[in-house]
Image (tube, helix red, strand yellow):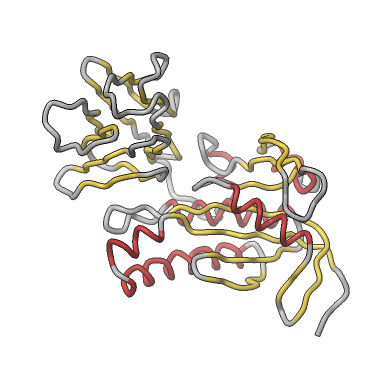
Amino acid sequence: MTTEPGSVSVLFADICGSSRLYEKLGDTEALRAVERCLHRMERAAEAAKGRIVKTVGDEMMAAFESADAAAQAAGEIQLRVDALPPVSGVSLAIRIGFHHGEVVEENGDVFGDTVNVASRLAGLAKAGQVLTTAETAALMSDELRDRTRAIDALAVKGRDDAIDVVEVLWGRGDEDLTMRFSATPPAVRDTRLRLRLGDQEVWLGASKPSAIFGRDPYADLVTYDSRASRGHGRVERRRDKYVVIDQSTNGTYVKFHGEPEVVLRHEEIILRGRGQIAFGHSTEEQGEELVEFEIVG
């Protein structure tokens, strides 16, 4: 049965990092971890009065009556998944795209240009990022619209003109917005992160939430390692957690004290306790530069 077009916000949420789970844990255990993550995503969407249209693999599609509801669901999804502990050293993260417009519903599924745009935005988003269109942001309340920032005009398959894309700031250095997304938000601990590379030392916290590392002389932590990229990666604070993000050619190696080493390739992981970070090579290689990290608080 096909219904007449209606106006809704369509949201796609995709799990990043699941392929590494399947490699490390095998199909059965990895599937359980993905299902737990999907369950959190579905509950967050339903809490914002959304309808789960379908889940395919590690992706969820949901529909909402308003742009505000979709934005609130997106923030709640990110918050709930961000709170999950790493599985065998792998942190799952979510990338989200949503767009408001007309759709056609058939047998419980929805179709149309709005769906295509939302799906495209989810594909463009980075891990931990929420993207929507400027057109959709204009429909949001002033309070939520003020928490967006313009990204770029991007081409979308099936559309002649590029669309203006904005990011919804759900929690990266923006605790107020994240608190509003959650009915019972967890307390934010006053944690600090100490990073040391040779005689260079950087402290991250509420007043300095991020640091860049690489061979660029203007980086916060400068390495002379030939296997490091100029802009190798960064560390950023998200609420009371710190995430290391690889943006390099040769990867970033992270070693937590007493645990196996984790290799990031255009991925990210939540830091905990203390350990070491290496640029493009194992932390166990002798005589190479290492970043020592320790979370305090």
* Viewer-side residue, 76 vs 133: 133
Left or right of 141 on screen, residue 261: left
Q: Between residue 92 and residue 71, name the one nearer to us.
A: 92
Asked whether, in this view, residue 89 is left or right of residue 286, the answer is: right
Instruction: Tell me which residue sits at (37%, 28%) in the image.
Output: 229
Quadrant location, the N terminus: bottom right
Please tell me which residue is depicted at 78% across the width and 60% down the height of the picture.
113
| Residue at the spot 43% in from the left edge and 28% down from the top edge | 210
Quadrant of the frame with the C terminus: top left
Relative side of 60 to 21, left or right:
right
Res. 233 image quadrant = top left
Q: Residue 114 location, x and y as percent? A: 76, 59
Among the 4 quarters of the image, the one containing residue 42: bottom right
Q: Residue at x 54, y 57 (%)?
A: 77
x then y, percent, for residue 280:
29, 35
Label count reads 0
x and y percentages locating residue 283 in the rendered image? 19, 37
Q: Is residue 180 above or below residue 152?
A: below
